[in-house]
Structure formats: C-alpha cells, structure tokens
Image: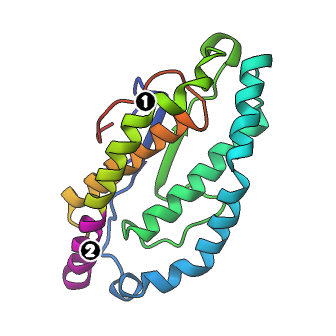
C-alpha cells in the first residue's frame, strides 16, 4: 500500500508491504525477540495511563487546551506501540525502533482545542467508542487466526500474503483511529467503521 495519501479523517495509518522476502528464522523465533522490546513498550504504555487521560480530559473541559508537548508524547508513544505490534504480527522484519518511523506510518493532526474540539465531548467519547471496542475485540480474534496463517506462509514461502497483510493493517488503522478519538481525544470526528483508509 505504501505511504498513505492525505485523507479526510485526521488519523492516517499505513504499513509498507515488505519489498523482499521476510526472514524465516526471525519469524520462527519472533516470540523470543519480542521480550526485550516488549518490556520497554510495557513501561511506556504504563506511563500513558488512565491518570493522563483524566488530566487531559480536565484540561480540555476547563481550559480548552491541548498542550503540544502532551500531544507529541502521546503520538510518539502510539507510533512506538504500533511499530511493536507490526513486528509482533510478523508484518515487517525490522526490530521496532524507539525513535524512527521505519515502515510504519502514523499521522495525526494536532488539534486546535479551542476551535476544533468540543470541550464536553471528552466526557462521552469513551462511551461513544464502545461499538468500536466491541468490533475490535471480534476483529482481534480474526487477526489471531490471520497471524497463525501468516506465520506458516512466511515459514514456507518467505512472504506475508498481501490480503492477510492488508487485513491486519486495516485492523491496526481502525484501532489507531479509535484510540485517537476515545483516549487521545485529538478529534471529535467519529471514527469510521472500516478497515480501509
């Protein structure tokens, strides 16, 4: 699919399809390669916890502000987490970098809290996103089966079947948009119910 085109939704996500065969050795032992970087991801995601969500909610509600440094931290954390997920889901062989995009592209428009965000929406976004969380839970089961299928496909052919790759990419896109709407609070535009861009 390549790098995304500018679209209407303020959260854009894509993963470059591998242009060379994937490493069978790395694929076979991926679970062990995930442990060190998984610890780092766990520490960072625990730092982006519920208390920060409530602090941001209060800041938007009472001050109508979304500090740029806070946005940058959330965005960098989400990008890193997505690089980890892409690696864990066997979509790419590059070990997840803490500070480079690699082949994982996430772009989120910085919100203008005064003009672009309704100060009362953060109170209900978590509830409004409930249908998305339910859909994502069901899709996660499908992603698990696709991951197993892709693992075998890579071991035998060295390639991630493109249809399976696009399905998993679509799941990660949907997840990113839901997180950006309901937890990062960067947009009031309701996420679309689709895997595609």
Q: Give the magenta-colored segment's residue range.
A: 144-159
The picture places residue 103, in percent across and down from the top left corner, at 46, 57
The verdict on residue 127 being magenta is no
Q: In this view, does 101 lie above or below 84?
A: above
The picture places residue 8, in percent across and down from the top left corner, at 41, 23
Q: Which residue is drawn at 57% across and 51% down?
A: 79
Front-most of residues 77 and 26: 77
Residue 4 in view, yes or no: no
Q: Is residue 69 left or right of residue 92?
A: right
Please give the label number shown on residue 6.
1
Q: How far apart are labels 2 and 1 at the CA level? A: 32 Å
Dot 2: element = helix
Q: Earlier in the sequence, mark 2 or mark 1?
A: 1
Q: Which residue is drawn at 68% across and 46% down?
A: 50
Residue 41 in view, yes or no: yes
Q: In this view, does 93 lie to the left or right of 67?
A: left
In the picture of the structure, the residue carrying the numbered disc 2 is: 148
Q: Main secondary structure of the magenta part?
A: helix
* Residue density around tag 1, few if under 14, some if 14–19, many if 20 or more, within 10 Å: few
Instruction: Say which quadrant the C terminus sits in.
Output: top left
Name the image quarter holding residue 26. Answer: bottom left
* Residue density around tag 2, few if under 14, some if 14–19, many if 20 or more, within 10 Å: few
């Amino acid at each position: 699919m390549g790098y995304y085109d500018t679209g209407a939704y303020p959260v854009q996500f894509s993963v470059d399809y591998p242009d060379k065969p994937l490493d069978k050795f790395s694929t076979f032992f991926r679970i062990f390669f995930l442990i060190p970087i998984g610890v780092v991801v766990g520490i960072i995601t625990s730092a982006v916890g519920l208390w920060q969500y409530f602090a941001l909610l209060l800041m938007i509600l009472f001050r109508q502000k979304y500090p740029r440094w806070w946005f940058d931290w959330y965005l960098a954390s989400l990008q890193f987490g997505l690089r980890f997920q892409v690696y864990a889901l066997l979509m790419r062989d590059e070990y997840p970098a803490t500070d480079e995009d690699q082949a994982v592209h996430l772009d989120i428009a910085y919100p203008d809290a005064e003009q672009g965000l309704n100060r009362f929406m953060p109170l209900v976004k978590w509830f409004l996103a409930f249908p998305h969380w339910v859909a994502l839970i069901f899709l996660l089961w499908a992603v698990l089966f696709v991951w197993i299928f892709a693992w075998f496909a890579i071991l035998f052919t060295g390639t991630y079947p493109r249809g399976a790759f696009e399905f998993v990419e679509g799941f990660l896109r949907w997840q990113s948009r839901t997180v950006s709407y309901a937890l990062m609070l960067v947009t009031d535009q309701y996420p679309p119910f689709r895997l595609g861009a």
